[in-house]
Image (spheres, rainbow, N blue to C red):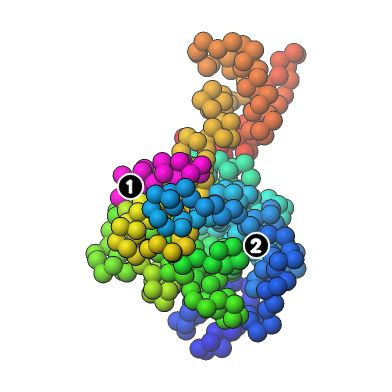
Amino acid sequence: MKCPRCGREYEEIIPPFCICGAELELTYDYSSIDVKKWKRRIPGVWRYKELLPPVKKIISLREGGTPLLKARISEKLGVDVYIKDETRNPTGSFRDRLATVAVSYGLPYASNGFIIASDGNAAASVAAYSARAEKEAFVIVPRKVDKGKLIQMIAFGAKIIRYGESVDDAIEYAREIAKLNGLYNVTPEDNIIGLEGQKTIAYELWEEINPTHVIVPTGSGSYLYSIYKGFKELLEIGVLKEMPKLVAVQVDKCNPIAAEILGMEKECREIKALGLYVRNPVMKSRAVKAIKETRGTAIIVSEEEIDAGEKLLANEGIFAELSSAVVMPALLKLVESEFVEKGDKVVLVVTGSGLKTGEGGREKFSIGGTKLEILKILKDREMYAYEIWKALGKPLKYQAVHQHIRELQDLGLIEEAYRRGKRIYYKLTEKGARLVENLE
């Protein structure tokens, strides 16, 4: 693409801003788009291929096409509320939309692999799609990250580097490592190519209900901007008359985008909803523009309200991560303030699964207490089953240790080191060593 201001051309990496300072945005020949073709294709991100960057090979796990559910809370509030359940993507989050496009487009440039800086979801997604593409994935994540997401990265074979207190710190570090090692950087704050995949949620919402309001959990602002771009392109094509109002939801302790919209002093402290902990969002200006142009607003919720939101979504049958649970208390505030009224069609975007956070993620991947203890025991030296049993030092049947060993082998976390007589000595695999290192 060419910079609209200075004419500089970009092909491999499309940064958010040109070196001349102009904002960069991918555009297409909207006059040639025939949306009727979409209905003849299977649901998913690549259903909308005319509005995605051209690629030689699609790396897909059947992402997108996620369910849109009518919320039971609609009856109580007197407003039509729908939940867009992005937890149903292959790795459990909206970032799979980004990963399929970023990895597919970057494949010709990724001879040494891919790299991304992320607070968790994007790293897990890129790790999965890189594995599918048979490429190495390097992920730079903050020191504090949800364990379920971390275990996903390990399971997909990513090389994990822990750096900084938030994703803001990790972005610059990923940039340096990408240059030094010839890695293709798909961090959206440095390369907007993957955002083209994220915008497809807007096409799906338009095809399904054409909403009046879309409520979005907001950290970096990239998903809100992506949704805005998708709806703006539908306007360009001529099939949409009016954009839905976009609502950003942030937490009172970390609210740089909401503070800008609401004209208040910003807070930037660590929060338990780690996916929303972004101190200096690079996409801030784009997110603010999207909210203002759609006549939307921003809502700030407390951490106590997030807990209530998690329960309300669970009542709807959806287990959401804390970063997504903010949408429910935001909805209640919008109804109370009459920003949302009877006759409106409101969409709550649930961005990630609760199974990816905290202990839930650990249990999902079958890494329980005893298995983790065995891995830590094998960290120092090879041992055979009886030695492991003795080292555990707790009331556990010897046969149970053998079962744990077999399961750890099946998970690719330990392997046979050597045999001495009838004794089989075990050691950690590379994946097992990474898991222990990152969980300690």
Where residue 266 sits, quadrant-wise, is bottom left
Per the rendered image, the range of residues in magenta is 302-318
Q: Which of 239 and 140 is in front in this view?
A: 239
Where residue 213 sits, quadrant-wise, is bottom left
Residue drawn at (60%, 59%) of the image: 97
Q: Where is residue 354 in the image (x, y as percent from the top left)?
A: 49, 42
Secondary element under disc 2, as helix, strand or loop, is helix
Q: Which amino acid does label 2 sit on?
A: Val
Q: Which residue lies furthest to the bottom in this view?
A: 6
Within the magenta stretch, is there residue 85? no
Asked if residue 374 can be seen in this view, the reply is yes
Residue drawn at (64%, 73%) of the image: 51
N-term-proximal mark, 1 vs 2 = 2
Secondary element under disc 1, as helix, strand or loop, is helix
Magenta stretch secondary structure, dominant:
helix
Where residue 195 sits, quadrant-wise, is bottom right
Q: Which amino acid does label 1 sit on?
A: Glu
Report the disc number at residue 370: none
Report the disc number at residue 305: 1
Label 1, label 2: how many angstroms apart (C-alpha)? 33 Å
Q: Position of residue 264 (x, y in %)?
A: 24, 66
Q: Position of residue 301 (x, y in %)?
A: 32, 53
Residue drawn at (42%, 57%) of the image: 79
Asked if residue 272 can be seen in this view, the reply is no
Residue drawn at (67%, 68%) of the image: 48
Q: Name the residue under label 2.
A: 45
